[in-house]
Image: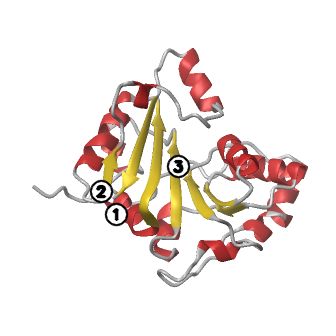
Amino acid sequence: MTAGPEAPGSFFGRRKGKALRPGQADRIARLLPQLRVPVGLEPGSLDPRELFPAQPAEIWLESGFGGGEHLAHQARCNPEVGFIGVEPFVNGVAKLLGVVAAEGLTNIRVWDEDATQLLPALLPCSVDRVYILYPDPWPKRRQRKRRFVSDENLALLARVMKPGAELRFATDIDDYAGWALARVFRSPDFVWTAERPQDWRLPWPDWPGTRYEEKARREGRISSYLTFRRV
């Protein structure tokens, strides 16, 4: 039986938290326009490699980067890769921009709107890796249709990901891990790569850890690290 639509509306909550400090507000005003992915794009028209001065070897996309700790870590460890970070929460964008400015990172571009507005604009098969790390679990039953991992969004991701590309998903909510697996299992585009329990119980070798992960550990929640492959 075909699943019904799950994903109307946006997949994020607040756009802004506490007031930005003057330096943060200045970076939003001055640096973000330089790094922002262009808006108003025609469907399937954007080659993400062209966002960078030197065309990168690969494109990795992180949807919902929070404060940007993981994104910045990957960018500094993989200077040959071009990164697109998606995060509508302006305070998180401001934190990332602070690191970009302090370290002079040149391989990060930012989309500060909903990911579902960006994905249709990208060229097919133009992304080599996608991260969805500790997304909002929307725990109440009536909210679950707002979870980012849905049949519709997996199809959007599959269109832009190259065959063999990895989709990495982390959560500390057991229900969301099961939710994601159920949708991958019924997707024709992805397979789960795990062969043994350690493959989802242990983080990836290049995982730097995040503040969300540390908070979950302190509160007694166990994280799952799921790797899916685009077929």
What residue type is disc 3 on?
A: Tyr
Q: What numbered label is drawn on residue 100?
A: none
Q: Which residue is drawn at 53% across and 69% down?
A: 118
Most foreground residue, 31 or 186: 186
In the image, residue 120 sits, relative to residue 172, either above or below, namely below
Name which quarter of the figure residue 140 lies in: top left
Q: Distance between the residues labelled 3 and 1?
A: 15 Å
Where does residue 126 sit, x and y in percent of width and height?
51, 70
**Pointer 3 residue:** 131
> The N terminus lies in which quarter of the figure?
bottom left
In the image, residue 167 sits, relative to residue 200, either above or below, namely below
Q: How crowded is mark 3: few (under 14 residues within 10 Å), some or many (20 or more)?
A: many
**Pointer 2 residue:** 151
Q: How far apart are marks 2 and 3 (CA)?
A: 17 Å
Way the structure is coloured:
secondary structure
Q: Residues within 10 Å of mark 2 (few under 14, many from 20)?
A: some
SS for callout 2: helix
- Is 157 displayed left or right of 45 in the figure? left
Q: Which residue is drawn at 66% across and 71% down?
A: 37
- Is 126 displayed left or right of 231 in the figure? right
What residue type is disc 1 on?
A: Ala
Instruction: Report if the CB atoms under discs 1 and 2 are less than 8 Å apart.
Output: yes
Where does residue 146 sit, x and y in percent of width and height?
39, 50
In the image, residue 107 sits, relative to residue 40, either above or below, namely above
- Is 130 displayed left or right of 4 in the figure? right
Label 2 or label 3, whichever comes before in sequence order: 3
**Pointer 1 residue:** 155
What residue type is disc 2 on?
A: Asp
Q: Residue at x 61, y 35 (%)?
A: 207
Where does residue 206 sit, x and y in percent of width and height?
62, 37
Q: Residue at x 76, y 48 (%)?
A: 76
Q: Residues within 10 Å of mark 1 (few under 14, many from 20)?
A: some
